[in-house]
Amino acid sequence: MKRSLLWAPLAVFILFLIIFMTGLLSPEGQIIRSHMIGKPLPNFALPAGLRNSAGLRTQDFQQGKPKLLNVFASWCVPCAAEAPQLMQLAQSGVTIDAVAIRDRPEDIANFLARYGNPYRKIGSDRTSSIQLALGSSGVPETFVIDGNGIIRYQHIGDIRPENIPEIFAELAKAR
Amino acid sequence: MIAEAGLAALWLAAALAGLQLMLGWTGLSHQRDDMLAAVRPVAVIQAVLTLLAFALLIWLFLRVDLSVALVAANDHSEKPWLYKFAGTWGNHEGSMLMWVTILAVAGAAVALLERRLDDRTLTATLSAQAAIGLGFYAFLLFASNPFARLDPAPPEGQGLNPLLQDPGLAFHPPTLYLGYVGLSVAFSFAVGALVTRNVGPSFARAMRPWVLGAWILLTLGITAGSYWAYYELGWGGWWFWDPVENASLMPWLAATALLHSVTVLATRDGLRAWTVMLAVVAFSMSMVGTFLVRSGILTSVHAFAVDPRRGTFILALLAIYIGGALALFAARVGTVREGSRFDPVSREGALVINNLLLTAVLGIVLVGTLYPLVVESMTGEKLSVGPPYFNAAAGPLALVLMAVMAVGPLLRWRRDELRNLGRRLAIPIAIAIASLAGVLLLAPGIRILPFLGLVLALGVGAASLAPLWKRNLRRTPLFIWGMVIAHLGIAVSLAGMASESAFTQERLVASRLGEAQQVGPYNIKLDSVMPIAGPNWTAIEGTVTAVRGGHSFALKPQARAFWAPPTETNESAIQTVWDGQLYVVLGRADEQGRWQLRLWWKPFVTLIWAGGAMVAIGGALALLGRLARERRTAMREAWA
């Protein structure tokens, strides 16, 4: 066997390394957002999530001011994790309405007593039908809705402290 | 304080790995025996320290210490204890800590138990092991610290992912990791032997149990993974040529080749350079596999948390170790004298063909796995090379490989006559011809690959029993039994694959309640569909009655929806009978109230995994047999 042939495996390996490097350095694909962005909210009128309070309707989002629509559930652990961030947003003057998914009034009340209540109104979606109509695939998710009821932005997963600036920025854009 | 103690133990272990490498290096290059003598104890203490760090991390998970970021992200106080325990390595950082722990313990085992190799080669081996360890310690400490604190600590952990709460996931990763680490030990032996130019039977005998052990675990891991995908994904397939599956198949192919060439080196002192090369390739494949899975540069049905920075780190390690080993190989192997010669018609000859075919299959899988990556880097398009490529390219080679596998064990070492071989193979060939006629008569229309597969499976099955022919079965060494059972297992598995691909009947129907369908020998009726609720999911559950020749049983397929995180899974209903499996998946309802049902009748599909289990059992017998024989030899030498 020729001595130079012994270096062939190393050469092949270096070729692979180059391929791997270009693969690592190339930009990543975008996460697929809801196709509902830029479209008006679907029509809905949900019963109240808490006893003795008002429900949530599409018209609540057409009053000229941008709002957050938070999709949550009392049985969802990440929702508890994002509660402090929602409280912080509410305390800085953001209006947050919520859709509670497959939930019971007493469980919602317990959840809010434990983690705080950042919501102005809560609608109860017992069958997930409004959640699906929103193009939301899970809880928690948060939508920015402008004053005309158009969906402007979707945040998938819990809102972490580092996400708060982008939520504010999206609210400002929706103004 | 537990987390800090763990981190301290990890740093100390890393420092000891550095010391181990330095002592070995200087000791070897300056002929300092006192330094060489220190390497073994350092390797043992290093293992104790990593074990301590890993035990402390397990403790943190068991007591749900949420001030540790990793625990907060993956644990939950209401998890059952088994999943708190297994959750320790059900995440990136924990699994990497487990990796180095196994690596260090394997190094300590080599240091404590290995007595066959000369001291210099052993020290060089342990130094190579320390160099690998050092890279992974750096990876842990700088890019994935498992003990990082979280301030403020959250009130509850985030990890209650129901999909990960499966006993299989508690044991699947450790099995594969043990296999990968076993290959890393083989790699270190190869590097050690190259450094001291001692590539001979004693090196092969020291390396063989590690290769065999790693190979058994990889076999188990792949078999279990294949059944899990078959059972859980609800697609009715048992192998998808998915990058993550290929990532575990490639090290297995290399390890299979290595296993056979190391035997040639240990028994006949042949194939020296080739065995060293394969040891390097086998470990490279397990690192490439880890890199592909962890860096996320390939799209896969398996979703892992990925991080490009970590990918870069693993790539750098890959470049250093594999590049270094290949350079060492190129520089040194020319000075390794080639071992004994042999005729083309001989056991060695058959094993060389086996090795070449396995390597070719490995190359095909590697190219198919990386091709999408190459295309994406050049054109930016995402594509996937599916089963059409892999089956067409690797299938025929695999069938030739089977035939060689049947012939090889019947050949004598060094030199044999083709005439004698014909005599030994008479019965298997007769069986193959009979089955050829039988398949042509009973199933005339089947495709060529499954057809050849069935015929070969029967012939190879018979041939793999032939080494036992005319032997006194009670005095046959355990490792011969191991070989026979492993080869028979391959034939059994091949029979299952061929039967599945030739005779599977699939029906996709939209069925009203009470309507009857036929699939294979079964008459199927959808009786009812009911919503049911589990602890963290809701589902619709169908009740399906299957009738065959007067016997009936009920199947309950489910379509489940989990809440957090939102995931839909199909819980397929599978009924195993002696001659196959009935596989039912429930889909959605259409507007007219008809339910989508997927029905499969898969004759003899279970043979695929039964064969895999036989291969692993055969490997275990061979390992036990080899260890027992060496023990006896060692004792005899001690008495003499």
Image: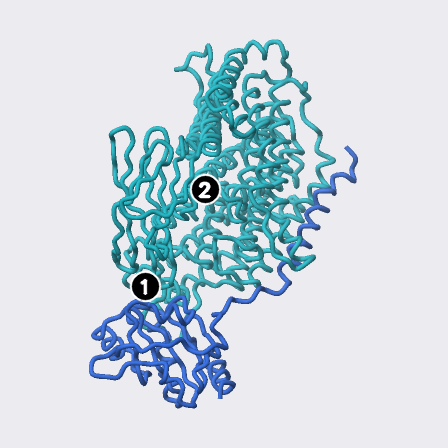
Chain to which the residue tagged by mark 1 belongs? B
Quick check: marks 1 and 2 in contact, CB under 8 Å?
A: no
Position in image of residue A58 (x %, y %): 36, 81
Position in image of residue B193 (x %, y %): 63, 38
Colour blue belongs to chain: A
N-terminal label among 1 and 2? 1
Estimate how packed mark 1 is, as few (under 14), some (14 to 19) or many (20 or more) residues with alpha carbons within 10 Å: many
Is residue B480 toward the left or the right of residue A7 in the image?
Answer: left
Estimate how packed mark 2 is, as few (under 14), some (14 to 19) or many (20 or more) residues with alpha carbons within 10 Å: some
Looking at the picture, tell me which residue is in the foreground, B123 or B582: B582
Question: For numbered disc 2, what is the local secondary structure?
Answer: loop
Position in image of residue B212 (x %, y %): 50, 34
Looking at the picture, tell me which residue is in the foreground, B283 or B632: B283
The label nearer to you, 1 versus 2, is 2
Q: Is residue B220 visible?
A: yes
Tell me if residue B497 comes above or below residue B176 in the rendering. above
Q: Colour of chain B?
A: cyan
Tell me if residue B45 comes above or below residue B491 in the rendering. below
Residue matched to label 2: B237
Q: Residue at x 58, y 40 (%)?
A: B390
Tell me if residue B259 comes above or below residue B149 in the rendering. above
Q: Amino acid at mark 2?
A: Gly
Residue matched to label 1: B76
Chain to which the residue tagged by mark 2 belongs? B
